[in-house]
Amino acid sequence: MTTADLCRVRTYARRFAVARGRDIDDCESAATWGYVLAGKAYKPSKGDFWTYARMRMWGCMMDLLVPKSTAPSGAPATLPSSTDAIDVREALDALPEDRRQVLEGIYVEGLSARVVAVHRGVHESRISQIRKDALARMRVALGDGYAVA
């Protein structure tokens, strides 16, 4: 891991921690672990390394939230299992690259559809169409047991 990589990991972790009111050191540790896992598992066929690494870092940081999480009213009493998280990641990885990038931009990185549209050089309505199609594909891939936003 280079110094530049470490700075990117720490920045990503801090944004995550601040947005969710979590301990920055814990998130930095989890993100670093996610980066290491990404480095071990990455294959060029998975696309851009940083896109892949961010997903792994996000997953490791989300794991921090599960034991401390409380279900909102109306939510199921049980939390998703790690098997569920793996299923979701596999379904996400199976999406066409443009669909996966749009979902990651909106749901993982917390970008607005407008920002994703500018980044991709398309109109915001096109991002909405891609998002809708990607979520429909995720529903099919995951089956009836999952509610996809």
Image (spheres, grey):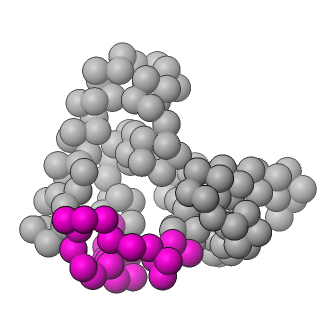
Q: Is residue 76 visible?
A: yes
- Taking the spot 31% from the left edge, 65% from the top edge, the residue there is 72
- Taking the spot 43% from the left edge, 23% from the top edge, the residue there is 114
Magenta stretch: give its range. Answer: 64-88
Q: Nearer the viewer, residue 139 or 20?
A: 20
Q: Position of residue 20 (x, y in %)?
A: 56, 57
Q: Position of residue 95 (x, y in %)?
A: 31, 52
Q: Nearer the viewer, residue 119 or 31?
A: 31
Asked if residue 77 is among those painted magenta in the image, a careful observer would answer: yes
Q: Position of residue 1 (x, y in %)?
A: 83, 64
Q: Nearer the viewer, residue 127 or 98?
A: 127
- Taking the spot 21% from the left edge, 74% from the top edge, the residue there is 76
Q: Is residue 67 left or right of residue 25?
A: left
Farthest-out residue, left:
144
- Vertical placement of residue 89 versus 107, above or below: below
- Vertical placement of residue 101 versus 35, above or below: above
Q: Nearer the viewer, residue 43 or 35?
A: 35
Asked if residue 132 is among those painted magenta in the image, a careful observer would answer: no
